[in-house]
Structures are given as structure tokens and as C-alpha cells.
Image (cartoon, rainbow, N blue to C red):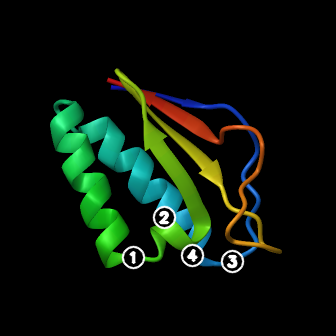
Amino acid sequence: MEVRIESMVSVWDDQIPMLLINLVNTAVFARNGSEFKTAIRQLSENTDFDKFFAYGYGRNHFWLKQRLASDASKHMENRLLIVEF
């Protein structure tokens, strides 16, 4: 797994740094894409991850964008990071 941070993190809530660190640790320690997807699903179910981040999957990658503080239904234009499987 390769994690590439592509833009600056906007820390408008105290939870954001820890959630981001959890995500990066998950990516670094996952053995494959399937294990990573399972861990992301658990992170989403057990934390406020979806409140702060929008994300999705491509064929061989995971992308992450940060949601806007002013309107959580929208997200920043640029990706925050990408994880390549």
C-alpha cells in the first residue's frame, strides 16, 4: 500500500487529526485492498469519519476528500490523499 498526501489538512475539529492518523495507520498495516476496505468500513461505523471526510474507491486505489466545515454535504475540490493498493 502506498499513501500519498496531496493537499493540506484543514483542522476545524479536534477529531480530524486522529481520524486521519487512524486512516494512514490502517493503510500502512493492511496487507491488501480487501483488508483495507474492511478496516475503512469499521472506521466509518465506529467513528465520525463520514462526518469529516468523503471517500471512494477506484480499481486499485482509495481516495479521500475533506468535507467543508460550513456544509458537510459538500467537500473540498482537491483530494486530501490517495492510497494505492
Residue corresponding to mark 2: 19
Identify the secondary structure beneath mark 3: loop
**Figure check: 50 above or below 2:** below
The reply to whether the C-beta atoms of the residues labelled 2 and 1 are less than 8 Å apart is: yes
The reply to whether the C-beta atoms of the residues labelled 4 and 3 are less than 8 Å apart is: yes
x 33%, y 65%: residue: 43
The reply to whether the C-beta atoms of the residues labelled 4 and 1 are less than 8 Å apart is: yes
Residue corresponding to mark 3: 13
> What distance separates the C-alpha of mark 2 from that of mark 1?
8 Å
The reply to whether the C-beta atoms of the residues labelled 3 and 1 are less than 8 Å apart is: no
Residue corresponding to mark 4: 15
At label 4, the amino acid type is Gln
> What distance separates the C-alpha of mark 2 from that of mark 3?
11 Å
> What distance separates the C-alpha of mark 2 from that of mark 4?
6 Å
Residue that lies at the very extreme toward the front in this rendered image: 73
Residue 75 is drawn in which quadrant? bottom right
- Residue 13, image x, y percentages: 69, 77
x 76%, y 50%: residue: 76
**Figure check: 67 above or below 15:** above
At label 3, the amino acid type is Asp
Label 2 vs label 1, nearer the camera:
1
